[in-house]
Image: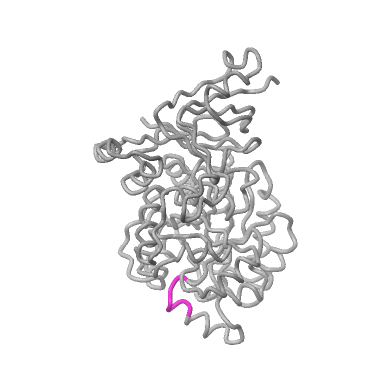
Amino acid sequence: MAAQHVLVRGQVLHFLSDPGPEADPAAWQYFDDGGLWIVDGRIEGAGPWDAIVPALPPGVREAAAFHDHRGRLVLPGFVDTHLHYAQAGIIGAYGRQLLDWLNDYTFPAEARLADLSEAERAAAFVVERLLAHGTTSASVFGTVHAHSADAFFAVAEAHRLRLLCGKVLMDRNCPDNLRDTAESGIRDSLDLINRWHGRGRLRYSLTPRFAPTSTPEQLRLAGELFASVPDLHLQTHLAENRAEMAWVADLFPDRRSYLDVYTHFGLAGPRAIHAHCIHLSNDQRRAMAASGTSAAFCPSSNLFLGSGFFDHAASLDAGLRVGLATDIGAGTGFSLLATLRDAYHVSQACGTPLGSLRGFYLATLGGARALYLDDFIGSFAPGREADLVVLDWAATPELAWRMERTTTLAERLFALMILGDQRCVVATHVLGEVAWRRG
């Protein structure tokens, strides 16, 4: 078959590395009149439009699908490093604190997915909302039901998305209707791995909810499975809430810390991501970084449940891979733009304000690196999969008014991350093709 060519023109921005707190200009590329040349869903070239066009082979410009986004910002698709798809229906439920939230809202919401049709309906809704908000990759929790992962993977596959998902492992300290066993949880996970891991753009993520809801035996078996399957991923929660941390200390008295529980059972390392990571020492951050474990920064959720403030600067300084996350449904929306606004608020509380360039790095390449997917997504480097989001700088009157008064790219991006939301998303492309368009 003939190669499929796509050309995209717009204000192209992508990152090569973490810009750091000083916004190192070597860390990104920006082309005010830029272009992307996409061949069979992968980036063939990215640069100034006037350099892209002359490089095209004869006949390609005439034959290619052309998307004209001049005057709009073109970024790699957003990467959400942590969310619970079963919880989309409880966004905005009265929160209180983490353990109350789990008992009052989370567990009843997840129990509803015992019905396969409800799981399929929720999966379809969440994938559509991710695309509408410019998110093209995510690390997603299912529920304890194996078919919850099947349902989500099926929808993700139909949309050709690069997604991670897994069924929750939970064999204690939870309702009976959401409890598996150490053996059944691993057996179901292995069946799902055999069905989905490495199929198209999908990968499986082992998903122990968090240490309090798994017995030592379940954690041990999960660690053994994690070590035994090439390229397998793992997701869980760490150090979100002080009451949670005290509970872990009571349940695992022989371990030095919450992090040590996961390290002891083999639930840390490359391709493992721990959500929240708020109440950690610098030594623990450095230990996570040395092991290759990543952190998911969930500012909206942490503010909503009063859990505390994640110190992004200390974490990145320690060498941690950090990505941005909505943490639906304690997180209050699917928009990573709105999540960036909350990330800035949290960073101010920590005394280390998050700059706009570093913020958009966290939402794109930073997230891809945190999920160990940066060989595939997160930038417009040659060979990367051509997932992208197109943003309208002036989607609202407030943004348009502010943009008239900006003079630098950093100022424009900062206004976008503070004032922007879903209304800014013009289009979302998956493998070069439009998967969602405004209106």
Q: Residue at x 46, y 56 (%)?
A: 21
Seen in the picture, residue 308 relative to 419 is either above or below; the reply is below
Color scheme of the displayed model = one colour
The picture places residue 131, in percent across and down from the top left corner, at 46, 40
The magenta stretch spans residue 206:
no
Pick the residue in front: 318 or 322.
318
Quadrant of the frame with the C terminus: top left
Nearer the observer, 226 or 51: 51
| Image quadrant where one finds the N terminus | top right
**Residue shown at the point (54%, 46%) measured from the top left:** 27
- Indicate the quadrant where residue 54 lies: top right
Residue 274 against residue 398 in the figure, above or below: below
> Could you say where residue 257 lies in the image, as x and y percent from the top left?
56, 80
Residue located 61% across and 71% down the image: 287
Left or right: 303, with 295 as reference point: left
SS majority, magenta: helix
Q: Which residues are magenta?
A: 240-245
Q: Position of residue 6 (x, y in %)?
A: 57, 24
